[in-house]
Amino acid sequence: MDVVYEWRSLQEQKLAERMQHLFDTGEATDHLRIMGQTEIRHFIQHYERLTRFMLEEMPSRADVTLYLNDNHKIADIRVNRPLPGCSDA
């Protein structure tokens, strides 16, 4: 969940940068709101139990599981069952 927090914090940082750019150009930013660290942690807590369960339980049930690295890129792909219409050949 630490990575989830880091990634969400990065999203908020990018939103803050976007808001600053919009503010500098005179565009409205009233519809945008930045979460602080406490708000991000509280937001993530709403999904943590479900996320932990899914990370533990779903890879064995999924046809395909994609594992992401720290740069949000696919680091590994595990195929449990070939998708319909796909062959190994």
Image (cartoon, rainbow, N blue to C red):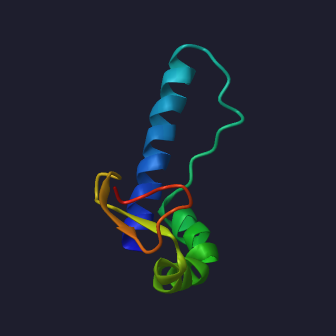
At which x and y percent is residue 20?
49, 28
| Residue name at image x 60 percent, y 80 percent | 50
Quadrant containing the N terminus in the rendered view = bottom left
Nearest the eye: 30 or 72: 72
Nearest the eye: 53 or 25: 53
At which x and y percent is residue 56?
47, 85
In this view, 29 is above or below 68: above
| Residue name at image x 63 percent, y 18 percent | 27
In this view, 85 is above or below 18: below
Left/right placement of residue 21 relative to residue 76 reads right
At which x and y percent is residue 14?
45, 39
| Residue name at image x 45 percent, y 33 percent | 17
Image quadrant assignment for residue 61: bottom right
The residue sitting at the top extreme is: 25
At which x and y percent is residue 8?
47, 57
The residue sitting at the right extreme is: 31
Left/right placement of residue 67 relative to residue 30 reads left
Nearest the eye: 42 or 84: 84
Image quadrant assignment for residue 53: bottom right
